[in-house]
Image: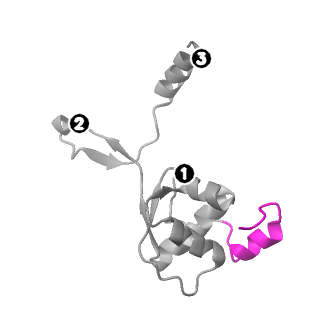
Amino acid sequence: MIDPDLPDRLFVVLSGRTAPAPDHVFDPVSLIVAADQAEAGLGLEERAIVQACTRPLAVVEISAHLRLPLGAVTVLLSGLLEQGHVSVRHPRTHTAAAAGGTGFVSWQPPDLQLLERTLVALRNL
């Protein structure tokens, strides 16, 4: 697509935007799905995102596919989401139905102690 080392080109692609809209939060593993295939009025990179997302793709996969920085991809996705071209499926954590949960709740950050224990265990392998 574009050379990410050329900041001027990146500025043009993002239309001067430097961050996604405040109400649009994208986790790197959030899945993006094209809501429609209408591409009129979209830039080259935005069209590439819509075409790639005919099947669910993680934000980080889109970034790798387009060879664009993750931050730039979230800005593009924010615009596409606002225009209704894509939808977002955020990661969820499982809750026990016995605890009165519905089975799923909105995404929560992982437990740091669990991650640290896992890292120690992996290093000990």
- Spatial CA distance of label 3 from label 2 is 31 Å
Residue 79 picture location, percent across and down: 55, 74
Classify mark 2: helix, strand or loop: loop
Q: Residue furthest top?
A: 124
Work out whether mark 3 precedes mark 2 in sequence or the reverse, and give the earlier one.
2
Classify mark 1: helix, strand or loop: loop
Residue 65 picture location, percent across and down: 62, 58
Q: Is residue 82 rendered magenta in the image?
A: no
Residue 76 picture location, percent across and down: 60, 69
**Between 1 and 25, which is closer to the camera in this rendering?**
1
Query: Total of numbered circles in the picture?
Result: 3
Residue 89 picture location, percent across and down: 40, 58
Q: Which residue is mark 3?
A: 123
Prevailing secondary structure class for the magenta stretch in the rendered image: loop
Classify mark 3: helix, strand or loop: helix
Q: Is residue 3 rendered magenta in the image?
A: yes
Q: Is residue 116 at least partly visible in the picture?
A: yes
| Image color mode | one colour
Nearer mark to the viewer, of 2 and 1: 1
Instruction: Please name the amino acid that badge 3 sits on.
Output: Arg
**Between 36 and 71, which is closer to the camera in this rendering?**
36
Q: Which residue is mark 2?
A: 96
Displayed quadrant of residue 63: bottom right
- Residue at x 66%, y 63% (from the top left corner): 72
